[in-house]
Amino acid sequence: MRIIIITVFTAATISVSCSQKSNRITSATLIMSDSVAKDNVVAFFDQSSPGGNTSVSNDLDYNYKWSGQSPFTASGFGYFTPDGHEIPYVKRNRDIGQTFTYKGKAPRKLKSITVRLGFGDNVVRTGTYGQSISIQLFEVSGKRTLNNNGSDSTKKAFHGYPHNRVELDIPHERDDFLEGIKFEMLAVMSGFKFPEKVDFGFDNSMNIDPDHQNLKGKYLNFIIPEQSQIILEPTKEYAFLVMIDSIGENRGFTLGNLMNGHYPGGFGIRREGHGIFPPVTAYPEFNFNHPLNRPAVKTSLFPSDFKERILVPPGSNGYPDVDTYRDLEFYIKI
């Protein structure tokens, strides 16, 4: 089994509110491998679809989500209103993760979180190699309710795969999202580094096609630093988010998942930009830097201050797709 170990050692503290401080741990190790050992795994979902580009991203490459005409970069579809109008918006940057339930009989220290690179055609964008990655951890609580976004069994969903609501059937549950969930932050762990090109078997000077077979299906094992002291309590639900720390050109990577997963102890989650739902309307006839588009562009990005970014609550809602029924391929070890 080919294993790559990437380690960084630094230290910092981050203030998360006026009355609370949380250690931002920045001593971290990331192990990339071709397979995953399942010893001491206490929560997992071990399936991924053979395609799709559900991705973590922190990208400066603006793109209108819009099927109409635009002299600027545009692709896909906006979201739709009940009267059938398509609303354009700017593609949003994302942190991606999963909730899970610890079903052990005794409290145990969290040792690692493993996710898998996906199998789509945009697996690792060209600006991602060597970038700093963080993991944010939460305890999850609250009485959740399902919001069908106004699309019941008699209507197509207003957004969601396959996105073309005018010509195609979008199953009504594709825009469902969960409400009433509380995410209490436990820790932010930084210092992980996404693998370099050489770790995938390439020369670091090469231009790598994001669809290259060598990129697909690799496991990323995030070793939880000893000083974090994250203790999993029996029957409690937790969550993690995978984050690209800083914004730049072509920064993103896909994570293996099933859109209609069936992990019984949780569900997929995401943080999108400033967390505004629905997305702020954009004006594709104008450039991205036009004053009319500044609110749409700003809210599609994460807050520039990392301390503010980690306070934007995650959830199952998302554009163009929700994560309500999605599960990442993941493995939690103690």
Image (cartoon, grey):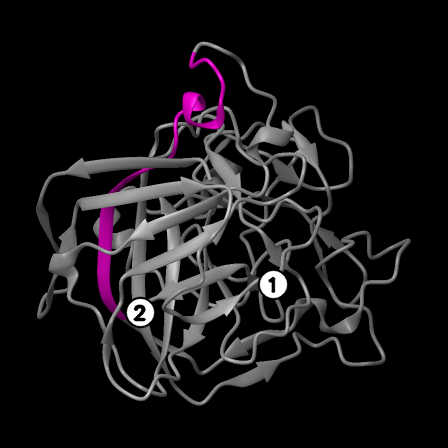
Q: Quadrant of the C terminus?
A: bottom left
Q: Check residue 182 for magenta coloring.
A: no
Query: Which comes before the other along the chain, label 1 or label 2?
Result: 2
Q: Is residue 305 visible?
A: no
**The residue tagged with tag 1: helix, strand or loop?**
loop
Could you tell me how far apart the alpha carbons at marks 1 and 2 are, in whole angstroms? 20 Å
Percent coordinates x, y for residue 36 in the rendering: 47, 53
Residue, disc 2: 138
Amino acid residing under circle 2: Phe
Please state which of residues 292 and 209 is positioned toward the viewer in this rendering.
209
Residue, disc 1: 322
- Residue 111 drawn above or below residue 143: above
Q: Which residues are magenta?
A: 185-204
| Labelled pair 1, 2 in contact (Cβ < 8 Å) | no
**Residue at image location 43% in from the left, 39% down from the top:** 58
Percent coordinates x, y for residue 331 in the rendering: 44, 62
Image side of residue 113 versus residue 63, left or right = left
Q: Comparing marks 1 and 2, which lies closer to the viewer?
A: 2
Image side of residue 86 versus residue 188, left or right = right
**The residue tagged with tag 2: helix, strand or loop?**
strand
Mark 2 neighbour class, 10 Å CA radius: few under 14, some 14 to 19, many 20 or more:
some
**Residue at image location 44% in from the left, 9% down from the top:** 205
Q: Check residue 201 for magenta coloring.
A: yes
Q: Quadrant of residue 211?
A: top right
